[in-house]
Amino acid sequence: METDLLIVGGGPAGMMAGLLFARAGVKTLVIEKHADFFRDFRGDTVHPSTLALFEELGLLKRLLRRPHDKVSNVGVVVGQKYYRVADFSHLPVPARFIAMMPQWEFLDFVADEARHYPTFTLQMETEATDLLREGGQAVGVSTNRGDIRAKLVIAADGRSSVLREAAKLPKLDLKAPIDVFWFRIPKAKTPENHTQGYVGAGEMLVTIDRGDYYQCARVIPKGSADRLRQLGLQKFRVDVAKTAPALAGWLDPIDDWDKIKLLSVSLDRLTRWWRPGFLAIGDAAHAMSPVGGVGINLAVQDAVAAANILAGPMASGADIEPLLQQVEKRRMKAVKKVQGMQRTVHDRVIGAVFRSEKPKASIALKLLSALPFLQRTPARIIGLGVQPEHVRSPDAGLRVE
């Protein structure tokens, strides 16, 4: 099989890149190793910066027809008292909220929109196993279904990227000090979305409201999972109930460790994202901490930047090798800044929580909650991110309804 562009990985970066390159007239093939997009361990937070991109594409109204809840502000419960941290209602974008949309819905939507272009193909159950090279140039990938040759390979296959390793791109490990226990708790459906954080004595919990259940993330010190498992399920439930008393009556279904999954958190980035014929974006280029829920949005921003720089030249048949480094240069500053902020939160906020014997709100948190105008700053940082991109890649006019 041959194509102009081969994108490996059907996550946010891969699917958004597939849509934008196909829209520009580039013959694009996206391969995804799974049979569908349904997986729990994926972020649900579609931030205002990402929603703004879909508005630029004329797709925002259609996207928001997919199941989602609107979160116009976020806060944290410390010692059973709620503090508001960020208010998105003042952001200078069309959608002034975070859309809590299951990622499988988001990815399915992008795939459906991309299929309107005859230049787009999505092939599921196709797993990349190695990078094909000729004379130092990447020319495609080997997969479980045979070799696929391409003029450019984009690795968007996540933080455990096979292709990133095959390309021998140098990586800087920033040593995330946390892991996450991930589990579900049933709940009654409420008119408003109650996604929020909880802080207790030495404990931190985040609850993602998915309508009739919470997807919960208990943040734990890196490497402490086995010790906590040895303390038993009853102790686990007691600790969760102490941190978030509102959940106390809903914990009985957590009756087996198989219902609690360990997510090993990584924080790293490639110091070089490209080789001749090859480019890494999204989690394959930089694994983010779950702090701020920014991973999906940074991945989408990478895809937009890559399309802005490469799609037009590819569609016209120009040599893109000199342009690959520009994608890295464009996105590296934003990645470094966000990871720097995440490290600060790890050390000064989460680290302080782990060390605390009694939950106590900081003066800064109290001021944020008491003075609403201060909440606009964290709202911009969370909602718009650092160096938000805008769609500048061409539209070849190939869309078929």
Image: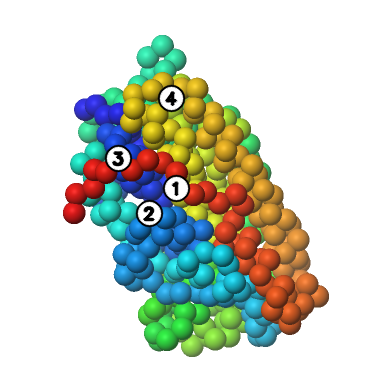
Local packing at callout 1 (Cα closer than 10 Å; few below 14, some 14-19, many 20+) is some
Q: Circle 3 is placed at which residue position?
A: 396
Q: Position of residue 79 (x, y in %)?
A: 69, 82
Q: Identify the element where label 3 is drawn.
A: loop
Q: Circle 1 is placed at which residue position?
A: 391
Residue drawn at the location 63% of the way across and 72% of the way down:
86
On residue 320, the disc is 4
Tell which of 6 and 72 is nearer to you.
72
Residue drawn at the location 78% of the way across and 72% of the way down:
364
Q: Nearer the viewer, mark 4 or mark 3?
A: 3
Quarter of the image that includes the C terminus = bottom left
Distance of label 1 from label 3 (alpha carbons): 14 Å
Disc 4 marks a residue whose amino acid type is Ile
Distance of label 4 from label 3 (alpha carbons): 18 Å
Asked if residue 192 is positioned above or below residue 290 in the image, the reply reads below
Distance of label 1 from label 4 (alpha carbons): 19 Å
Q: Circle 2 is placed at which residue position?
A: 57
Q: Identify the element where label 4 is drawn.
A: loop
Tell me whether the residue at label 2 lies in contact with that at label 1, contact meaning CB atoms closer than 8 angstroms: yes
Q: Who comes first in sequence, dot 4 or dot 2?
A: 2
Tell which of 399 and 118 is nearer to you.
399
Q: Quadrant of residue 44?
A: bottom left
Disc 2 marks a residue whose amino acid type is Leu
Q: Identify the element where label 2 is drawn.
A: loop
Q: Who comes first in sequence, dot 1 or dot 4?
A: 4
Residue ranking furthest to the right: 363
Q: Who comes first in sequence, dot 2 or dot 1?
A: 2
Asked if residue 201 is positioned above or below residue 22 in the image, the reply reads below
Q: Position of residue 221 (x, y in %)?
A: 65, 59
Q: Who comes first in sequence, dot 3 or dot 2?
A: 2
